[in-house]
Amino acid sequence: MSAASYGLSGFSAYVPPYRVDLKAWCGWTGNVWDKIRNVIGTGFRVPGIEEDVYTMAANATLDLILRYAIDPQRIGFLALGTESSMDNASGAIIVRGLVDRGLAARGMPRLARDCEVPELKQACLGGLYGIKAALRYLNFDGAGRQAIVVASDIAEYARGSTGEPTQGAGAVAMLLEADPQLLALDLKAGASASSFRHLDFRKPFARFAGQTLPANGRLRDFPVFNGKYSTAAYVDETLAALDLMLAKRGGERGDYFRNLEAVFMHRPYHRMPHAAWALAYLFALGSDGESGRAELNGYCAQAGIDPAKVLTEMEGLAQRAFQPDFNEQLAEPYPLCASLSKVLRESARYREVVDDKMQLGSAAMMEAGNLYSAALPAWIAAGFEEAADSGRELAGHEMLVMGYGSGDAAEAIPARVASGWRTAAAKIGWARALTGAVDLDQQQYEALHDGLAAPGLQPAAKGFLIERVGSRESGSVQDFGVTYYRYLASDSAIG
């Protein structure tokens, strides 16, 4: 990295207090707990009827400002990454308004008047797109300023669907600046990949047809998705972005995998990044010289597969995009490599290049569920907090940040840990954000899932809350569907 580096200097998170224990959920639904725990995780959060993406984003952003003693007047860029917007005209400006209210309640100046307020959306990639936009701002017209990017989402699926155990809700706010205190991001060395995946994962407005506006104004946001295809698309696009990044980098690709300190990827559920990263390592071996091919041939021999056929399957990755015929059964896009991945998974090399590289923060993320655009930032935050707590040394080490958004697009960005990272990491508070959970019973969970008040459940959310939703459609003042908020200034959890 050059001396003029830009990147991340702080994190703060907010998750709703309402928790679904996945072991209990398995008892309600008849799912197998061991499988859910190993593949998905241990729990997820559900927003209360008094919360939405904007209240969660504002809670995380205000906490970031207070936790890192940020001067609000230095913030020239406040971006919101989300796919759970409730307004098609405004987004980050709503977050700004709430944060300004919270700052005023504490006798602090509001955010700078010239602060830019974009919202970015590309499924789960919105948060990382916000980071890239912030870095470009800081590198050009925002020189000498600071930026905040907050990723906030509600991941919800119909009960009984395959996506139900992968739900979640929360927000992560990030401080970005020149000479970052945590992690410098090298956009020039990174790479993007995108392809239109027609029936991967969509949220067409037609989903809302026939819904009655609930008291809190938050319509149910269940996606249209095809799970097996979505998994294949995730793997395919992340492989393409990584392939393009490694082509820029040059050198032995396998060495890059082995020498990385850590990799953080978008995680819709616990095992998904592991599967994609293992395949990526096999593709790296296929692109390397004699040593890489020798290792790949060893896996082929164990699987009884012709290495030449494997190399043919790997060819032209960045120039094509897997597209299924939805009138037929969905085929595995890389069947031979998928078979090799099973062999790799039983080896010591797998523990070295997959498990070890994804260890930081992984256990803490088992409780997070899928946070959509906030999932990747949350994992980075959890990883740095764990490293600081455990005494692990990261200064100067190289990491990789990989984002993904269904539909779809992927990003691969090399990163390097700052020398004084421990001071900034000590302020993150990811574990603190998970404390005070209120475990829901089945009836309470189903009520909140339906947008209703949960029986026997006292509101536990704090900070910014929904007060009411406007209903005036005519006259001199119209506010139908517009949400009004309140701020509990005495909330000890904010700050």
Image (cartoon, rainbow, N blue to C red):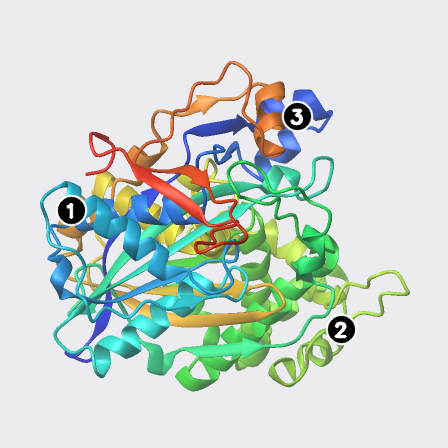
Q: Which residue is mark 2?
A: 323
Label 2 and label 3: CA atoms lie apart by: 34 Å
Q: Nearer the viewer, mark 3 or mark 1?
A: 1
Q: Which residue is mark 3?
A: 26
Q: Secondary structure at mark 2?
A: loop
Residue 40 coordinates in the image, percent (x, y) = 58, 40
Determine which quarter of the picture holds residue 292: bottom right
Q: Quadrant of the N terminus?
A: bottom left
Q: Which residue is mark 1?
A: 104
Residue at the (59%, 55%) spot, across then down: 275
Residue at the (64%, 86%) spot, across then down: 319
The residue furthest front is 475
Which comes sooner in the sequence, label 2 or label 3?
3
Label 3 and label 1: CA atoms lie apart by: 45 Å
Which comes sooner in the sequence, label 3 or label 1?
3
Say what amino acid the circle numbered 1 marks.
Ala
Side (left or right) of 211 relative to 318? right
Which comes sooner in the sequence, label 2 or label 1?
1
Task: Using a 10 Å C-alpha cutoff, classify the residue at mark 1 as few (fewer than 14 neighbours), some (14 to 19) or many (20 or more).
Answer: few
Task: Using a 10 Å C-alpha cutoff, classify the residue at mark 2 as few (fewer than 14 neighbours), some (14 to 19) or many (20 or more).
Answer: some
Residue at the (36%, 33%) spot, across then down: 434
Residue at the (52%, 53%) spot, across then down: 84
Say what amino acid the circle numbered 2 marks.
Gln
Residue 35 coordinates in the image, percent (x, y) = 65, 34
Side (left or right) of 106 relative to 296? left
Residue 140 coordinates in the image, percent (x, y) = 22, 83
Q: Secondary structure at mark 1?
A: helix
Say what amino acid the circle numbered 3 marks.
Cys
* Closer to us: 364 or 374: 374
